[in-house]
Amino acid sequence: MNKIKIKEHLSPESYKLITSAAKTAEEMGYSLFLVGGPVRDILLNKAENMKDIDLALEGDTKSFIKVFQDKISYKKLITHEKFNTASFEINSNLHIDIAMCRTEIYPQPAMLPVIEKSDISDDLGRRDFSINAMAIRLTGKNKGELLDPFEGQKDLSNRVISVLHQNSFIDDPTRLYRAIRYQTRLGFNFDIATFRLFLRGKINLSLLTPERIRYELECMLKEPDFKNVLSMANKFELFDMLGFDDTGIEYLNKLKSCDFETGLCALCANMDKDNISQLHEKLNLPKSTSKLAEEVNAIMHLKTSRIPSRIYETLSGYSVKAIGISSQLASGELKRMLNFYSGKISKIKPLISSNDLKKAGIRQSAKFGKMLADLYMLQLDGKISDKADAMDKIRDLK
């Protein structure tokens, strides 16, 4: 029997949480297991800074959560009754997810599965890859036992990604995206059979809902090596339905760090307007995100100028965030113009206000706003340097 001493691999905080959960399970007569990614990372000696603890329970999840939540300190608890799961946010750097051991049946390809309560053997059998289909027993006389029914430890040693069955990518096409993430993050390769199934499974990507595609894109953009992850996904045409191309990947490579909105803006910075407008529906995006992507795309196609007033007129209608993202993506004259606007022009305050015009005896009229705008343009271009110059200029503009 292969036993793992998890204490040697975890932070004191993570180990304390797991120990508390295991003690609670034993007191209730349940069996508890550490599963999935945490087990994989322990075997790779990469679990010291673990942020997500995944536990599988043979027992009544609702009853367990009621007892367990009174024994720990946490910021937030989210439960999902459909899947009998609970997620505790301990702090910004640590989460613990508890799920009922279950089996999953896919009624049709790409549909969410129908779940049934089961045991740890079936629970491991429903998972995506062998390297994620391992568990460590946390309760009972065989505490610390490694459960590895699909030879995940062997695949870790051989640095390969293997699915558990032939219909894995057909049942759940989102596994195609996860396969790319693990391949890039871990530096692994697909085994030959899995690679063939990967290529065959791409046909069902079109069956995924916009929300699921967006979630997978978000996960990829959160990866530390998001540039290579998206480059690999683009190579295998996993986002062809969105219209991403090589130029979008090149823009993405200019980013030093990334969040979903910034990454999305980079990927669609070179798209035509029709594809941009369709993204809203294809990813079910919030209106604010769609607008930001459209702004960045428009900015990246602007004509440049070195005249301050023209730069202001060109850029003042765009949001600060759109200009900031665009400045990361742009080069040459466009980058110079964006940086000049953000660093200097946008910070110049008008010398003359509406109150100054009123004091000068100018009645408010349709020309009022235009006069202020004209004065500001002259100021930006250095044709008036102080308030006295501006007041003199008012007489010429009357």
Image (cartoon, grey):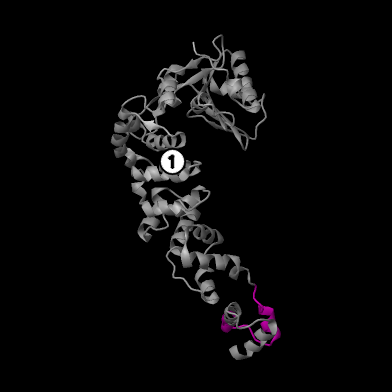
The residue at 47%/50% (across/down) is 263
Q: Quadrant of the C terminus?
A: bottom right
Question: Looking at the picture, does residue 361 appear above or below residue 266?
Answer: below
Q: Is residue 394 magenta?
A: no
**Farthest front residue?**
158
174 left or right of 335 in image = left
Dividing the picture into quarters, in which one does residue 362 lie? bottom right
* Residue 160 appears in view: yes
121 left or right of 386 in image = left
Question: Looking at the picture, does residue 262 appear above or below residue 92?
Answer: below
Q: Give the residue at mark 1.
A: 216
* Residue 119 appears in view: no
Residue 214 percent location from the top left of the image: 43, 44
In this rendered view, identify the residue nearer to me: 46 or 106.
46
Pointer 1 local density, CA inside 10 Å: few below 14, some 14–19, many at least 20: some
Q: Tell me the magenta residue range.
A: 349-370
Q: Is residue 354 magenta?
A: yes
User: How many labels sit on residues?
Assistant: 1
The amino acid beneath tag 1 is Glu
Residue 195 percent location from the top left of the image: 32, 32
Dividing the picture into quarters, in which one does residue 308 lie? bottom right
Residue 213 percent location from the top left of the image: 41, 42
Question: Looking at the picture, does residue 196 appear above or below residue 355?
Answer: above
The residue at 65%/84% (across/down) is 390
Q: Secondary structure at mark 1?
A: helix
**Farthest top residue?**
141
Question: Looking at the picture, does residue 297 appear above or below residue 262?
Answer: below
82 left or right of 19 in image = left
Residue 118 percent location from the top left of the image: 45, 18
**Farthest right residue?**
359
